[in-house]
Amino acid sequence: MYEVTIIKSFSAAHLLAEIGGKCEELHGHNFKVEITVAAEKLNSTGLLIDFRFLKKCLGEVLEDFDHKHLNTLTSFSGINPSAENIAKYICEKMELKVKTAGVNVVRVKIWESENAAVTYIPYAQKR
């Protein structure tokens, strides 16, 4: 099994309803996103996936979030834009973008700060 991981970031604001505490107030983060894709075989050029392609795909997904108030986006209509929900959303969008390259998204990690992160693993229940 081969894995490739890239990291990109975006800045956004959100508030988390009904959890108690300061996070119920509007606040912002410089989110860091780590995404890992994997496959059993390399492509004909000896790569799992071109880093440039993966970065481009993730950049397109993150463009919808960068410098936005996440609660106002239709992507999070009816749900808290928590790091957990952001990770799942990014994973689902990236799965659609990278499937043509023959890889699977195996994890998306969202860092809200240098010492707080959430990981979403889409296939954990299938292993």
Image (tube, grey):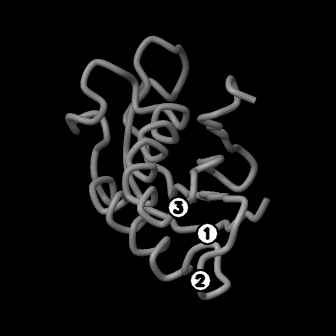
Q: How many marks?
A: 3
For label 2, count other residues whose C-alpha is less than 10 Å away and answer few (under 14), some (14-19) or many (20+). Answer: few
Q: Secondary structure at mark 2?
A: loop
Q: CA distance from mark 2 to mark 1?
A: 21 Å
Residue on which the image places disc 3: 102
Left or right: 55 as drawn, with respect to 122: left
- Which label lies toward us, 2 or 1? 2
Residue on which the image places disc 2: 44
Q: Residue placed at 40% from the left, 18% from the top?
A: 17
Left or right: 108 as drawn, with respect to 127: left
Q: Amino acid at mark 1?
A: Ile
Give the percent coordinates (x, y) of residue 10: 44, 62
Left or right: 52 as drawn, with respect to 109: left
Residue 63's place in the image compared with 48, above or below, is: above
Q: Residue placed at 31% from the left, 41% from the top?
A: 70
Q: Residue placed at 62% from the left, 37% from the top?
A: 120
Q: In the rendered view of the protein, which quadrant contains the C terminus?
A: top right
User: Does the CB distance between marks 2 and 1 fall below 8 Å?
Assistant: no
Give the percent coordinates (x, y) of residue 112: 59, 48
Left or right: 82 as drawn, with respect to 122: left
Q: CA distance from mark 1 to mark 3?
A: 17 Å
- Which label lies toward us, 3 or 2? 2
Of all residues shown, which one is farthest toward the right? Answer: 1
Of all residues shown, which one is farthest toward the front? Answer: 44
- Which label lies toward us, 1 or 3? 3
Camera-side residue of 45 and 123? 45
Residue on which the image places disc 1: 6
Give the percent coordinates (x, y) of residue 90: 44, 47
